[in-house]
Image (cartoon, grey):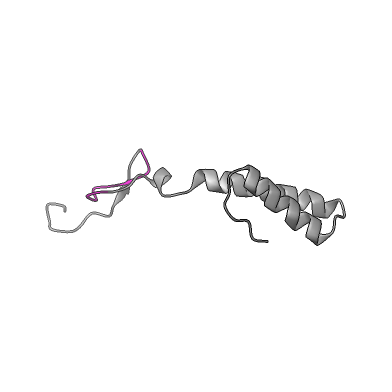
C-alpha cells in the first residue's frame, strides 16, 4: 500500500514472478517449456510429411512415433 492507503499494482520481478505477492511462483516454472519444444518437433515432422504429399495415416503414424521417441505419452492428431 502507498502512504495514502491506495493499493499498488503488482510488479513483475526479475525472475518473472509477481513481486509483492506472498508465495509468488516464477513465471518460467508455470510454463511447460520442454513439452512445448517437443510438441513443436512433432508438428514440424507432420508439416514436412504433409508438404511432401504423404497420406494422412502415415503422417499421424510418424508423428506418434516421433512423439514416443521424444518421451511424450500421447500424441493426438
Is 29 on the left-hand or right-hand side of 55?
left
**Residue 16, located in which quarter of the rendered image?**
top left
Q: Residue at x 54, y 47 (%)?
A: 35
| Location of residue 44 in the rendering, given as x and y in whole percent from the top left corner | 71, 48
Viewer-closest of 22 and 32: 32
**Which residues, given as a range, are shown in magenta?**
15-23
Q: Residue at x 64, y 60 (%)?
A: 76
Is 37 on the left-hand or right-hand side of 13?
right
| Location of residue 6 in the rendering, given as x and y in whole percent from the top left corner | 17, 59
| Location of residue 67 in the rendering, given as x and y in whole percent from the top left corner | 64, 48
Q: Taking 43 as reference, is 34 above or below it? A: above
Is 17 on the left-hand or right-hand side of 65?
left
Residue 53 is a magenta residue:
no
Viewer-closest of 53 and 75: 75
Q: What is the quadrant of the C terminus in the image? A: bottom right
Instruction: State the residue lying farthest toward the top.
Output: 14
**Residue 60, located in which quarter of the rendered image?**
bottom right
Q: Residue at x 41, y 49 (%)?
A: 30
Viewer-closest of 30 and 35: 35
Is 5 on the left-hand or right-hand side of 76?
left
Q: Residue at x 81, y 55 (%)?
A: 50
Q: State how many labels appear.
A: 0
| Magenta-drawn stretch, dominant element (helix, strand or loop) | loop
Residue 22 is a magenta residue:
yes
Amino acid at each position: 500500500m502507498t502512504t495514502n492507503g491506495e493499493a499498488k499494482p503488482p510488479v513483475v520481478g526479475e525472475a518473472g514472478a509477481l513481486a509483492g505477492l506472498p508465495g509468488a511462483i516464477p513465471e518460467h516454472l508455470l510454463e511447460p517449456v520442454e513439452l512445448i519444444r517437443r510438441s513443436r518437433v512433432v508438428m514440424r515432422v507432420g508439416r514436412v510429411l504433409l508438404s511432401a504429399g504423404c497420406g494422412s495415416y502415415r503422417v499421424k503414424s510418424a508423428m506418434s512415433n516421433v512423439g514416443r521417441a521424444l518421451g511424450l505419452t500421447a500424441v493426438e492428431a
